[in-house]
Amino acid sequence: MASVWHDTLPWIDGQPSSPFGGRRGIKQPRRRDDRSRVSEYVPGSRRAADASPNVARPGVVRRLGAVLMAGLYRPLAEDDARVAYWIRHVRIGVVLSEVCALAVIGYVLLTDSPGRHNAGLLGLTGLLVVACPALLLLPLGPMMRDRRGPTVFYLWSLVTAAVVIVGTRLDGGASSPLDALLFLTLTYMAIAYPAYGVVVMGSIMTVGYLLFVELPGLTTSGLFFLAVMVAFTMICAMSSANSWAVHDRQLMLIRAQEMLASTDPLTGIPNRRAFLDRISAAVDATAWGHPTVVCLVDLDGFKAVNDAGGHASGDAMLTAVGAALGAAVRETDTVARLGGDEFGVLADVSVSFSGEMLAERLREAVAAVGLSSGVTASVGVAEVEPGDDVVDLMHRADAAMYRSKTAGGNRVTSLAL
């Protein structure tokens, strides 16, 4: 055996090598490493070495910019009710702008002020009177669902602030009462904008007032006005943050209630209400060439499980069946508990995988779960047709399931139209 083992070993420089490395039975002197071609450069981690040299990690400025943009352009509306809210808000803002503009025109024409009868001031205010109602001509509904909505609000506020600051300058500067309109604009922003937007727009207004009204002759009263502007901006930002926080909490509660209303409390899968809603959507999708089937699964022998082990055993069986049916279909399909020991499955099918094949898979899944308890499934299959009535569709599937049940159970039946 030794000779055979010896012959199978690899040879190095005329000597047999050991299976554990080196030459068997011969202690060789340790060689010095040849470092003539080894660089003294110490590389970084392998992950860093493998990384593309052209891909740079975002810098601090870029990350802050991304955070700022996310804060400025958070979604305004995700449903029709919220869209209607923002449209009303735009209408209120238009009315407010019109009232303020007409008040300025009356101030210029009727008071003995530095801007009395000033053509430039009247022209700016008149332009605002004409331009603001044009906002109502925009497609506000779709715009409130994407970034165009916040952009409209920001541009509107910038133009209004610019008109107020220029008008204040034309009316004598810091002594003009027109700068009070900046506070009205900030108040409107606190209701409409997220906190980031309030801070940014308030800062732009404060800096603009400093540059175009107060400078170069900045006075103590001017500093006081700027300090009040900063403080008022912070108050409006806090108000905006609280308002959005309340909205987010309400939205979370609504979604939680909708989830509870559409979920079976025992199995955690969709209930009958959610199942029927998804069937309605599937009927519409079928018209566009998406073949779909409805399978009704009714358990055979389930009463015996309840009688033998009580409701706890029955509940455990229902939960296991719901999980087994969910594992037998794709994530895009729907498994729902319709009530009692009846389940529904809504799934897409194809030429290579028919509704009958899906139903057989469902039957096998239930049979595997109920093997020790004698629980099987009677399955009825109905294809979804374009223009189907949901009630008629469910009736066809129920009739097919009933045929499986009366034929002895543990089988699949499909009824054609």
Image (cartoon, grey):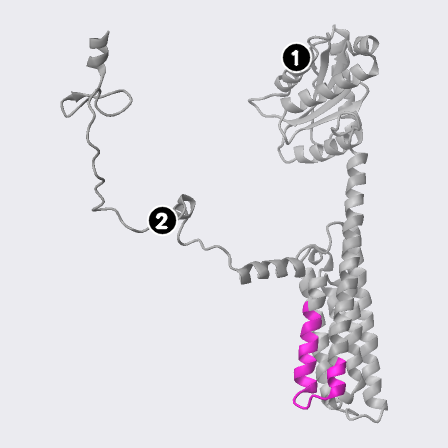
Which quarter of the rendered picture does the N terminus lie within?
top left
- Seen in the picture, residue 201 relative to 78 is either above or below; the reply is below
Task: Let me know if residue 153 appears in the view.
Answer: no
**N-term mark: 2 or 1:** 2
Query: In the rendered structure, does residue 212 fall within the stretch colored magenta?
Result: yes
- Seen in the picture, residue 241 relative to 162 is either above or below; the reply is above
Q: Position of residue 416 (x, y in %)?
A: 69, 18
Q: Disc 2 or disc 1, which is closer to the eye?
A: 2
What SS does tag 2 mark? Answer: loop
Magenta stretch: give its range.
200-225
Residue at position x 80%, y 65% in the image: 91
Q: Which residue is mark 1?
A: 368
Query: In the rendered structure, does residue 288 fall within the stretch colored magenta?
Result: no
Task: Let me know if residue 299 appears in the view.
Answer: yes
On residue 137, which mark appears? Answer: none
Q: Position of residue 291 (x, y in %)?
A: 63, 28
Q: Position of residue 61 (x, y in %)?
A: 54, 63
Q: What type of secondary structure mainly makes up the magenta span?
A: helix
Residue at position x 70%, y 84% in the image: 166
Viewer-closest of 217 and 399: 217
Q: Which residue is mark 2?
A: 43
Residue, far right: 110
> For the residue marked with disc 2, what is the amino acid?
Pro
What SS does tag 1 mark? Answer: helix
